[in-house]
Image (tube, rainbow, N blue to C red):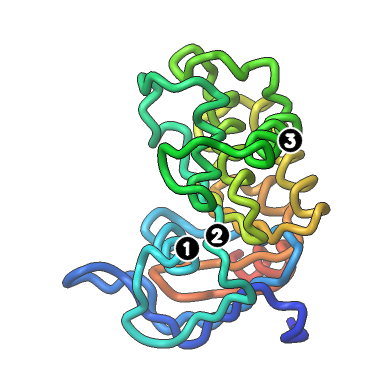
Amino acid sequence: MSHTPALDAVRIRGLSAGYPRRTVLHEVTATIPREQVTAVVGPNGSGKSTLLGVIAGVVAPQAGTIWRDSKERPGFVVQHTAVPATLPLTVRETVAMGRWAHCGPWRWLSRQDRATVHECMERLAITDLATRRLDTLSGGQRQRTLLAQALAQESNLLLLDEPAAGLDSSSQQEISRALAEISAAGVTVVQATHDHDEAMRADHCLLLRDGALIAEGTPHAAMAADR
């Protein structure tokens, strides 16, 4: 699949990356198109989470290069199960943490910050949950709260690690609709997923296996290469 560099959000060339004494990704070359949804698929251990970590800037490349079209820190959404539900935080407080990149941790939010937090909660339809604590929410509600927190950073690149994992069908569909709307609003979305249907709804797809890129292109083409 050909790409126009001006329309790329991320360009990865010859990337190898991993952790001390263990290389996970091996010479990966791929492109993330701007303002689209890209699904990163592959079996467990294929390197999906490591690739997201490199794009996010939390995992350093061992070799190769990665270029992003923005200097802003990407929004990074982990699985809702990775966040302790017992944290004594309300939904509004959790979303407001997304503004820390702009105002610093534990600082007073400005009027604009509060407006951004409210707007992000509205976009994820969680304003009615604003005063609820995380430990009173369903998995889908917690995941939407984490997504709103990432949006509050106002980054043009959003990374998600298995955002619908462990959620019921209704919650999965809510997350999928939210990602489509976010992309349509001009945000580049990259999500690692095991869900075939979710991957097929994406605009672009990267297929990883054993740390190598097996296929890149439309979801249909990438899945065909897998078969």
Q: Is residue 154 above or below residue 173?
A: below
Q: Are marks 3 and 2 in contact (CB under 8 Å)?
A: no
Q: Is residue 98 above or below residue 4?
A: above
Q: Is residue 116 above or below residue 33?
A: above
Q: Is residue 192 above or below residue 82?
A: below
Q: Secondary structure at mark 3?
A: helix
Q: In the picture, which quadrant includes the C terminus? A: bottom right
- Residue at point 47%, 44% (across, down): 78
Question: Quick one: label 2, few (<14), some, or many (20+) residues within 10 Å?
Answer: many
Question: Quick one: label 3, few (<14), some, or many (20+) residues within 10 Å?
Answer: some
- Residue at point 53%, 43% (across, down): 98
Q: Which mark is residue 56?
A: 1
Q: Which mark is residue 110?
A: none
Identify residue for label 3. Answer: 119
Q: Which kind of residue does numbered mark 1 sit on? A: Ala
Identify the mark nearer the N-term, 3 or 1: 1
How far from the left and from the top, in percent, is residue 202?
73, 56
| Viewer-proximal residue among 119 and 48 | 119
| Viewer-proximal residue among 222 and 190 | 190
Q: Is residue 46 visible?
A: no
- Residue at point 41%, 43% (across, down): 105
Q: Which kind of residue does numbered mark 2 sit on? A: Pro
| Viewer-proximal residue among 102 and 150 | 102
Q: Is residue 9 left or right of residue 142?
A: right
Q: CA distance from mark 3 to mark 2?
A: 19 Å
How far from the left and from the top, in percent, is residue 19?
25, 67
* Residue farthest toward the left in the current orientation of the protein: 21
Q: Secondary structure at mark 1?
A: helix
Q: Which kind of residue does numbered mark 3 sit on? A: Glu
How far from the left and from the top, in percent, is residue 197?
69, 45
Q: CA distance from mark 1 to mark 2?
A: 6 Å
Q: Which mark is residue 74?
A: 2
